[in-house]
Every structure is written in C-alpha cells, then in structure tokens.
Amino acid sequence: MNSRRGLGRGLASLIPEEKVKPASGLQEVPPDQIVPNPHQPRGPFREQELLELTASIQTHGIIQPLVVTQNPAGGYQLIAGERRWRAAGLAGLTQVPVIVKDVAPREMLELALVENIQREDLNALEEAQAYQQLMKEFGLSQAAAARRVGKSRSAVANKVRLLGAAPAIRAALLEAQLTEGHARALLGLEGDAEQTAALQVVLERELTVRQTEALVKRWRAGERQPTRAKPTPLPEVHALEERFQESLGTRVRLRTNEKGGGRVVIYYYSDEEFNALYQHLTGEQL
C-alpha cells in the first residue's frame, strides 16, 4: 500500500503484526493456482472494463501484484486483486505477480475489505458497500470502521450515505456515469422518484456538481422547469468514438456543440490503464 496517499496507520492498526506478515516476498505463480475471495467487496465486474484491462495487461503486464494467502487445501486464495486476476486469465498469462500474506481465516474478510478500500480502486458505491459490510460483519460503528482504514469518520459517513440513494443513482455510480459529488447533491431530494427525475436532468444536460446542487436547491424550493431533450449524436460522432476506442483500448465519448467545439472524454478504470494511456499518448512512461 502506498503511504503517500495519507492512509494513516491502516493495516498496521487493523491486525497485530504477528498475525499479518508476509509469508514470502514477491512471487510469480500460475493464475490457475489462485481461487477468488468469497468475501470480494467489489460488485459485479463490468465486461467492457474487464476487456480493457485485459488489453492493457497483454501489452504491459500486471503492474500491481495481487495479494493472496496460502490455501490450506493447496494453492492460494485472493485477498485483493480479483479484477486483475480475471483479466490475467483472459490475457493468457501463465504467471502472475503475487504477495503472499500469512492470515488467519477469521481475519480474511476484514483484511480483504481494508486492502480493497485502501488501494482506492473501488468506485464510491463499492467503497460504501465495503464500509457497510465491515461494520455489519464486525459490529463496528462508523468511527471505529474509519479508524480501521485510516479514514476520517465524516469520509466514511459520506460514503455510506450513498447507499440510501435511489437505485438509478446507485446504478449510474457503478457505471461511472455520475460522480460521488453529483450523487451526494441528489440525496438532497426526498424519495426515489424525485431523485431519479433529477438524475435524468443531470445526465441529459451533463450538469456539473455545482449545477446539480443549484438544480436540487431550485427543486426543493418548488421551482421546476421542463427538461430539454438531449440532441441525438450524429452517426459520424459514433463512428469517431469507435475509432478512438479501438486505438486507445478504452471507452471514449465525444461531446460537440453548435459552435464546432467540444471535448473528448477518455475513461480509465485503474492505475495500470492510466499509465498505459499516458504511454500511448505521449510515448513516455510515468
């Protein structure tokens, strides 16, 4: 884990050092000797995201090792890194880098949750679900859970609050159509129907977080305006998006305006993918 991200004491305060220690240093093991973690805190893996990571791994390999523990029945069980493990299988890798940790079975769930939260590759909703699971399984308060992962209590509380959003908002968060800031603003509206209606306006008009906050404020004051239909993208825009996606190996969206300007939105889903994109676009390595 990277100390520069300001994660506090993290795992050192979670489980005593004599209970969590590397069984060995960095190793290379066949991916078919690894079984997934039954306590995986991430939601279902999105196919497109997995395919994009597979393409990145085929080109650059796995940059961040998987974290595993030895399985009493033989082989290894994942603690963190299931998406990279699945992508490695799709990429046809015969060996993957792992860090083996000596962990008691009782601590597997807690360590898996904390590893995933602190590596910061969960999206906001998945992180909220991980906090909720951590609190439920171990009977922790928000303050206690925050101490376990080196976060502030308010940071944990803000994440967990996202679980009360309308289903459409939670789905948009999982699909990276919406930021955490947008979702938190929409939580200012009462009821799923009102939140979902506002969500449609946010997505159709591509509102910023500030604009979303202003929209919620107007709706709470009873000031609602009819929504404007979002222009249908031209076929040539779709064709250009596909060309960009084929070249970059990731999702790309073009946004144009009537004056001939616009923006290109390039999505990435992990540090590995960002590094690969940077190298592809600049010819340099980070």
Image (spheres, rainbow, N blue to C red):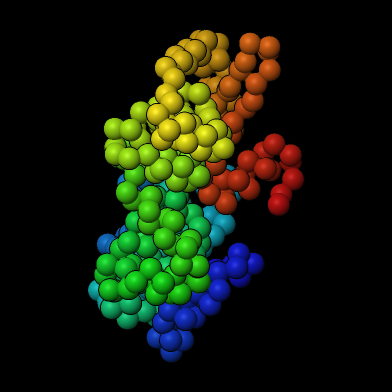
Query: Does the image show residue 134?
Result: yes
Front in this rendered view, residue 192 or 30 = 192
The image shows residue 63 at horizontal and vertical percentages of 57, 57
The image shows residue 244 at horizontal and vertical percentages of 59, 25
The answer to whether 183 is drawn above or below residue 33 in the figure is above
The answer to whether 102 is drawn above or below residue 143 in the figure is below
Q: How many numbered marks have been drawn onto this rendered protein structure? A: 0
Query: Quadrant of the image for the N terminus?
Result: bottom right
Front in this rendered view, residue 162 or 55 = 162
Front in this rendered view, residue 166 or 63 = 166
Left or right of 94? Residue 268 is: right
The answer to whether 214 is drawn above or below residue 101 in the figure is above
The image shows residue 74 at horizontal and vertical percentages of 29, 73
The image shows residue 84 at horizontal and vertical percentages of 45, 53
Residue displayed at 68% across by 12% down: 260
Front in this rendered view, residue 265 or 143 = 143
Residue displayed at 50% across by 71% down: 150
The answer to whether 185 is drawn above or below residue 40 in the figure is above
Residue displayed at 47% across by 31% down: 218
Query: Does the image show residue 91?
Result: no
Residue displayed at 68% across by 17% down: 261
Which image quadrant for residue 129? bottom left
Work out which residue is located at the far front of the displayed protein and give it: 221
Which image quadrant for residue 160? bottom left
Left or right of 259? Residue 133 is: left
